[in-house]
C-alpha cells in the first residue's frame, strides 16, 4: 500500500452522508421513514434495488480478490484482511450481541408491508446491516487504490450508499442498521490498510501474478528515435 492512499474525497462525502443520516434518524421515531419508503414502491425501483443489493453479498470479495492479486500481492492481502475483519465483526454483533434485534418484517408484523417477489423477508438479526458493511468495506478499499481519482471515489461511495438504501427499501433493515454497517465497512478497510502497510511492505508484495516485461534498449528497432513535437505559439491573423 502506498503511503498516500487515503481517499480524502470519499471520506469527506461519506462523513457528510453519515451526518445527514444521523440527523434523519434523530428527528423521527424508529420505523417512520422505513414505512414511508415502503408505501412508495414502484416497479422500476423494485427491480433496480433488488439487483443492486447483491453487491453487498460477501461472495463479491471472491470475485475481486483474484483481480487484485494479478497486479499486486499487497492489494490481494488488503482484500483478504478487509473481508475477514468486517465479516467477523458483523457476525459477532448480529449473532452474539444483538441476537434479538428485530427486522422491519418483525417490527411491523401487524402492518401489511409491500413485499417484492423473490426477496425473502427475514425477521431477526437486524443490527448491523451485513450487506451494507460489505459494500462499504469493498468500496472504501477500491477508493484507497485510486487515491487521486476523485470522481471515481464519488462513484464508489454512491454505489455503497445505494446498497445501503436498498436494504431499507427492501425492508431488510432500519436506517440505524445501515449506518452502523457503513461504519464497520469503512473501519475494516482502514484496519486492513494498517496491517498491510506495517507487515507486508517489502518488494515481493509490490509484485503481482502478471509479470511486467521490461524491454531493453538494445531490443528496440534500429533507427528508433523518440519523436519530438514542437508547439509553436499561436499568432492572431490580424
Image (spheres, helix red, strand yellow):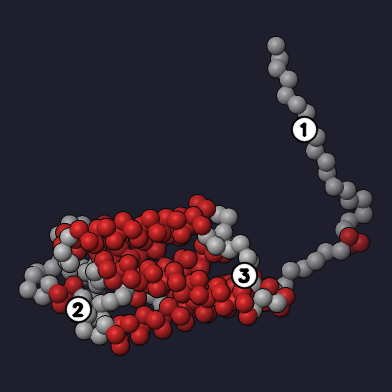
Q: Nearer the viewer, mark 2 or mark 1?
A: 2
Looking at the rendered structure, the secondary structure element under dot 2 is loop
Q: Position of residue 99 (x, y in %)?
A: 25, 85
How far apart marks 2 and 1 lie (CA) works out to 68 Å
- At 43% from the left and 78% from the top, the residue drawn is 86
Q: Nearer the viewer, mark 3 or mark 1?
A: 3
Give the crowd class for mark 3: few <14, some 14-19, many >=20 residues within 10 Å.
many
- At 31% from the left and 74% from the top, the residue drawn is 129
> Does residue 38 appear in the picture of this structure?
no
How far apart marks 2 and 3 lie (CA) works out to 40 Å
Q: Earlier in the sequence, mark 2 or mark 3?
A: 3
How far apart marks 3 and 1 lie (CA) works out to 39 Å
The residue indicated by pointer 1 is: 231
Q: Earlier in the sequence, mark 2 or mark 1?
A: 2
Quarter holding the C terminus is top right
Quarter holding the N terminus is bottom right
Q: Position of residue 138 (x, y in %)?
A: 46, 69
Q: Look at the picture and state if 117 lies above or below 156.
A: below
The residue indicated by pointer 2 is: 102
Residue 1 has which mark?
3
> Does residue 139 appear in the picture of this structure?
yes
Looking at the rendered structure, the secondary structure element under dot 1 is loop
Q: Position of residue 49 (x, y in %)?
A: 30, 63
Q: Earlier in the sequence, mark 3 or mark 1?
A: 3
Give the crowd class for mark 2: few <14, some 14-19, many >=20 residues within 10 Å.
some
- At 30% from the left and 65% from the top, the residue drawn is 166
- At 59% from the left and 73% from the top, the residue drawn is 75
Amino acid at each position: 500500500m502506498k503511503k498516500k492512499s487515503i481517499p480524502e474525497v470519499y471520506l469527506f462525502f461519506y462523513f457528510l452522508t453519515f451526518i445527514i443520516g444521523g440527523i434523519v434518524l434523530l428527528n423521527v421515531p424508529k420505523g417512520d421513514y422505513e414505512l414511508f419508503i415502503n408505501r412508495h414502491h414502484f416497479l422500476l425501483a423494485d427491480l433496480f434495488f433488488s439487483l443492486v443489493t447483491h453487491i453487498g453479498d460477501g461472495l463479491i470479495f471472491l470475485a475481486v480478490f483474484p483481480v487484485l492479486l494479478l497486479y499486486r500481492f499487497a492489494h490481494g492481502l488488503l482484500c483478504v484482511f478487509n473481508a475477514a475483519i468486517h465479516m467477523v465483526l458483523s457476525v459477532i454483533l448480529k449473532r452474539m450481541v444483538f441476537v434479538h434485534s428485530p427486522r422491519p418484517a418483525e417490527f411491523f408484523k401487524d402492518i401489511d408491508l409491500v413485499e417484492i417477489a423473490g426477496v425473502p423477508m427475514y425477521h431477526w438479526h437486524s443490527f448491523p446491516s451485513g450487506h451494507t458493511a460489505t459494500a462499504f468495506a469493498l468500496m472504501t478499499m477500491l477508493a484507497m487504490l485510486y487515491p487521486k481519482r476523485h470522481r471515481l471515489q464519488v462513484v464508489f461511495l454512491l454505489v455503497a450508499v445505494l446498497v445501503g438504501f436498498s436494504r431499507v427499501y427492501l425492508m431488510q433493515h432500519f436506517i440505524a442498521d445501515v449506518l452502523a454497517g457503513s461504519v464497520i465497512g469503512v473501519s475494516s478497510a482502514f484496519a486492513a490498510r494498517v496491517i498491510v502497510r506495517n507487515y507486508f511492505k517489502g518488494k515481493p508484495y509490490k509484485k503481482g501474478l502478471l509479470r511486467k516485461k521490461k524491454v531493453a534498449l538494445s531490443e528496440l528497432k534500429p533507427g528508433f528515435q523518440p519523436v519530438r513535437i514542437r508547439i509553436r505559439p499561436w499568432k492572431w491573423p490580424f
